[in-house]
Image: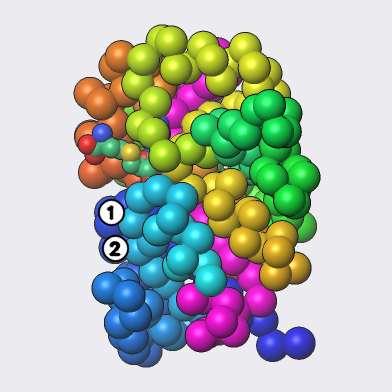
């Protein structure tokens, strides 16, 4: 089968980085979004800035599937760290995704998606991705990814790359209370963001694999908004270039 990859990111900075990799780009606008069609490392891709939140992500994935006939989705983005061993710059490859704001009690248990009756959506992990990213983001190589100065400034000399669960919801989590609710009630969740579970649900419903990779940009507490800006601006785009290259080169 000829693979067509739908590559999504929720930050303009990340998309800018990935767009630089696209050969012979052609732009198609649907629903106010720019879908950039072309090739990366000889593979057919459609790159799109999904915008933030579950609805934006779900409608973008559906367009990628229905209009562009992609057969694999790749999502890169940033996230707030929940588990305490994770720090800014670490990477979480999703193992499964859950909506932390889904709550239809008493009709269903908390977090269970009605009618589908699932709490967690399993997410595909591309072969060798964990090992590849560990190597690319190792202390000896991180300077090549983000530049030595940024590596030093953000203390990126020991980047952790893990394969764990991710929680999504329509909320920028930036208080100890909101963070703790996830930490306590969804203890296997490593980080929180606003799109992953929506992407995973649509891909589950269409039987299409998706790979979701998140970089920790903040710690989802009161300092989240402060940490977030410089990381997103200066580091996230280089991270996504490295992650997408790792996924698409074989
Ligand atoms: N305060 C920021 C908004 C960032 S949220 C600003 O003013 O620019 C935007 C994106 O980052 C979303 O796509 C979400 O998936 C991700 N994200 C990063 N940290 C997050 C957090 N602590 N909570 C929820 N989403 C987060």
- Whole-number angstrom distance, CA of label 2 to CA of label 1: 5 Å
CB within 8 Å, label 2 to label 1: yes
Q: In this view, does 97 lie above or below 242?
A: above
Q: In this view, does 152 lie above or below 99?
A: above
Q: In the current view of this chain or complex, which residue is farthest to the front?
A: 107
Task: Point out the quarter of the image occupied by ligand 1.
Answer: top left
Q: In this view, does 152 lie to the left or right of 84?
A: left
In percent of the image, x 34 and y 80: which residue is there?
30
Picture quarter containing residue 72?
Answer: bottom right
Residue corresponding to mark 1: 13
Q: Is residue 62 above or below residue 167?
A: below
Q: Residue 26 carries which label?
A: none
Instruction: Sort mark 1 into few (<14), some (14-19) or many (20+) by Cα contacts within 10 Å.
Output: some
**Is residue 164 at least partly visible in the picture?**
no
**Is residue 197 at least partly visible in the picture?**
yes
Instruction: Sort mark 2 into few (<14), some (14-19) or many (20+) by Cα contacts within 10 Å.
Output: some
- Magenta residue check for 70: yes
Mark 1 element type? helix
Q: In this view, does 75 lie to the left or right of 51?
A: right
Q: How many labels does the image show?
A: 2
Mark 2 element type? helix
Q: Quadrant of the N terminus?
A: bottom right
In the image, residue 213 lies at what x, y percent? 56, 47
Residue corresponding to mark 2: 16
- Residue range corresponding to the magenta coloring: 63-89
Q: Which of 60 and 7 is in front in this view?
A: 60
In percent of the image, x 67 and y 43: which residue is there?
113
In percent of the image, x 42 and y 84: which residue is there?
37
In the image, residue 180 lies at what x, y percent? 51, 12
Q: In this view, does 7 lie to the left or right of 27?
A: right
Q: Nearer the viewer, residue 97 or 13?
A: 97
In the image, residue 222 lies at what x, y percent? 30, 14
């Amino acid at each position: 089968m000829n693979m067509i990859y739908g590559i999504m990111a929720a930050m303009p900075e990340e998309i800018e980085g990935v767009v630089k990799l696209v050969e012979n780009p052609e732009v198609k606008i649907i629903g106010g979004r720019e879908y950039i069609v072309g090739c990366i490392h000889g593979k057919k891709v459609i790159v799109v800035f999904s915008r933030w939140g579950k609805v934006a992500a779900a409608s973008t994935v559906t367009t990628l599937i229905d209009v562009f006939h992609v057969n694999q989705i790749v999502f890169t983005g940033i996230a707030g760290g929940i588990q305490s061993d994770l720090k800014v710059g670490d990477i979480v490859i999703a193992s499964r995704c859950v909506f932390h704001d889904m709550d239809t009690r008493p009709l269903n248990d908390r977090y269970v998606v009605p009618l589908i009756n699932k709490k967690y959506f399993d997410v595909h992990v591309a072969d060798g991705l964990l090992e590849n990213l560990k190597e690319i983001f190792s202390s000896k190589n991180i300077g090549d990814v983000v530049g030595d100065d940024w590596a030093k400034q953000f203390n990126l000399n020991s980047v952790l790359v893990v394969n764990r669960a991710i929680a999504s919801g329509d909320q920028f989590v930036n208080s100890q209370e909101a963070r703790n609710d996830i930490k306590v009630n969804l203890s296997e969740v490593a980080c929180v963001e606003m799109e992953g579970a929506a992407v995973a649900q649509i891909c589950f419903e269409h039987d299409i694999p998706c790979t979701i990779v998140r970089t920790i940009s903040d710690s989802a507490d009161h300092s989240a908004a402060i940490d977030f800006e410089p990381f997103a601006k200066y580091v996230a785009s280089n991270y996504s270039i490295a992650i997408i290259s790792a996924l698409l080169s074989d």
